[in-house]
Image (spheres, helix red, strand yellow):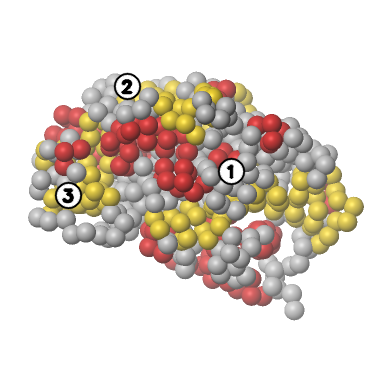
């Protein structure tokens, strides 16, 4: 059964230095508050995994939390590039960042294999691209039934997956809806999981298109209202598009970035 | 009466015209999304818009600001998981058109959105990467590319093949086992390029009003082939411009 915890407790218990950590979310429901807590607790040497690393990964990378990034698209959605990510790749600032680069189809299937307890996934993908030349984790496999040559990618098994959802009940059952991306697979693929939610309620009213993660499939749940900001939680908040635009300017310069993080993350009031 | 319009507006209108009503279109964000929504708001009301965030049949009444904009989920026929959109919908070839942008494009329609200059480990410019594009380019029935044409973007050979067009020429897609048809047309701010049926090389087939062949050649990093029957693109109609500008205005409002 999932434990109800504070965000600080959840991160302290579940996210360790050197871990493979997936903070998933596809534009919607991105666990920003949890990412900030990881930064405040000074985690280092992380392998960050995510299909679409965006601003929260830019912040984690810029603060030196990550050693390695496994991903398929790293950008500021609707705005442009991630400058901290670029600075780390191009100039090794503040620390070198190793990349393992995939396509969305490959990453999604890697999570599916992890969630399914399989060692790898099969897909039609990457063929003819330059990705397999640089990413060792893309191989071919021959179908034993048809002889067709297909692509194989290994399962992703994060040490811990962190996602944000709309709500949970007091037993720790989690409910999310709207664009739910690859979050279910990412939670089920992980050894441990932390879910932050907008609110904890007595009863989960059914919502069309919902995804439910049963309490016994989740390690810990923390109530963090607005924990996805500047991303959004459908039914609770709208995306703070201005923030994403402003981030472009904040993140271009190392000092401006550090100052911003100091003021808005490191010194932020932490939930007990 | 001919209205005033920008080269970007011409490009978006010309790209929108490429999408046929009733087809299913996998839409990348940015220029492709604007053009696809323009098509749906004009000649193709039954165009099925598919976004990689899992929104199938999205019907936004304003331009989405990202592929995960809430308006896409609110208006979709179905919202599915990301593994589902790639495995059940894209991979088996259910989607007619893939609509992509590019940071670099070469003479065979190969696309780079990964790195520019230097080498992969130490690039001059690190770009966002592949996203859904490699498999969209591989598996959709055909691909439409929309990209501004310049010596920076139109280069003889892309620095990194993120998504395959025609590889190094005729027969490459078949040899690689790619099941979709590949790039059918490339729309730029100068005109329209289509692959030569024999050589697969992108060939200038139409120019936007007021643009010259010399301009197109000067913005192309290879010796650009020009079709014998080079034609002119019709300028945007009043209606197309009105709808496009109304859509662009919704984007500015939504961003507030």
Compute the Cα span from label 2 to label 1. Answer: 37 Å
Q: Which residue is nearer to you in this view: A76 or A72? A: A72
Residue at image point 80% right, 50% down: B204
Judged from this view, the residue extending furthest toward the right is: B228
Number of the front mark, 2 or 3: 3
Q: Which residue is mark 2?
A: A45
Find out whether the residues at labels 2 and 3 contact each other: C-beta distance under 8 Å: no
Give the secondary structure at mark 2: loop
On the same chain, marks 2 and 3? The answer is yes
Please name the residue that numbered disc 3 is placed on: A168
A11 and B1: which one is in front? Answer: A11
Position of the N terminus of chain A, as image quadrant, is top left
- Residue B44 vs residue A115, the one in the foreground: A115
Whichever of labels 2 and 3 marks the residue nearer the N terminus, that label is 2
Residue pictured at 57% horizontal, 22% vertical: A133
Both marks 2 and 1 on one chain: no
Cα distance in 3D space between marks 1 and 3? 38 Å
Residue A171 lies, in percent from the top left, at 10, 45
Regarding mark 1 in the picture, which secondary structure is present there? helix
Q: Quadrant of the C terminus of chain A?
A: top left
* In the displayed structure image, the side of residue A124 where residue A94 appears, left or right: left
Instruction: Sort mark 2 into few (<14), some (14-19) or many (20+) by Cα contacts within 10 Å.
Output: some
Q: Position of residue B230 (x, y in %)?
A: 85, 56
Q: Secondary structure at mark 3?
A: strand
Residue under label 1: B139
């Amino acid at each position: 059964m999932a434990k109800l915890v504070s965000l600080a407790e959840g991160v302290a218990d579940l996210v360790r230095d050197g871990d493979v950590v997936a903070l998933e979310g596809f534009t919607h429901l991105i666990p920003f508050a949890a990412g900030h807590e990881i930064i405040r607790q000074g985690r280092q040497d992380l392998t960050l995994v995510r299909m679409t690393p965006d601003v929260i990964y830019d912040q984690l990378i810029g603060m030196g939390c990550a050693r390695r990034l496994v991903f398929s698209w790293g950008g500021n959605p609707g705005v442009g590039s991630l400058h901290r990510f670029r600075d780390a790749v191009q100039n090794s600032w503040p620390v070198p960042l190793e990349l393992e680069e995939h396509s969305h189809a490959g990453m999604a299937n890697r999570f599916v294999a992890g969630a399914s307890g399989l060692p790898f996934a099969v897909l039609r993908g990457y063929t003819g691209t330059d990705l397999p030349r640089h990413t060792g984790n893309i191989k071919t496999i021959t179908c034993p039934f048809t002889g067709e040559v297909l692509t194989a990618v290994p399962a992703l098994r994060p040490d811990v997956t962190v996602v944000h959802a709309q709500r949970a009940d007091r037993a720790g059952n989690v409910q999310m809806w709207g664009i739910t991306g690859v979050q279910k697979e990412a939670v089920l693929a992980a050894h441990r999981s932390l879910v932050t939610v907008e609110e904890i309620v007595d009863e989960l009213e059914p919502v069309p298109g919902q995804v439910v993660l049963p309490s016994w499939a989740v390690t810990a749940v923390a109530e963090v209202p607005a924990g996805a900001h500047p991303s959004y939680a459908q039914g609770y908040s709208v995306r703070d598009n201005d923030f994403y635009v402003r981030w472009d300017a904040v993140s271009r310069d190392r000092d401006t970035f550090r100052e911003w993080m100091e003021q808005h993350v490191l010194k932020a009031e932490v939930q007990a | 009466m001919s209205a005033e319009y920008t080269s970007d507006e011409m490009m978006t209108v010309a790209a929108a015209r490429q999408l046929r009503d009733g087809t299913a279109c996998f839409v990348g964000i940015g220029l492709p999304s604007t053009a696809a929504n323009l098509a749906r708001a004009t000649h193709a009301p039954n165009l099925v818009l598919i976004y990689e965030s899992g929104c199938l049949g999205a019907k936004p009444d304003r331009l989405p600001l990202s592929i995960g904009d809430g308006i896409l989920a609110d208006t979709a026929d179905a919202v599915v998981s990301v593994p589902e959109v790639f495995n059940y919908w894209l991979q088996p070839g259910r989607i007619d058109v893939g609509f992509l942008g590019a940071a670099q494009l070469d003479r065979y329609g190969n696309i780079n959105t990964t790195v520019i200059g230097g080498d992969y480990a130490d690039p001059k410019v690190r770009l966002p990467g592949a996203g859904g594009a490699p498999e969209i380019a591989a598996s959709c029935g055909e691909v439409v590319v929309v990209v501004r044409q310049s010596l920076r973007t139109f280069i003889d050979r892309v620095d990194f093949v993120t998504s395959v067009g025609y590889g190094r020429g005729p027969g490459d897609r078949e040899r690689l086992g790619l099941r979709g048809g590949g790039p059918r047309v490339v729309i730029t701010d100068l005109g329209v390029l289509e692959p030569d049926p024999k050589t697969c090389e992108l060939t200038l087939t139409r120019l936007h009003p007021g643009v010259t062949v010399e301009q197109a050649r000067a913005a192309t990093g290879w010796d650009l082939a020009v079709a014998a029957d080079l034609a002119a693109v019709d300028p945007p109609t009043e209606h197309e411009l009105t709808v496009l500008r109304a859509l662009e205005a919704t984007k500015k409002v939504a961003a507030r």
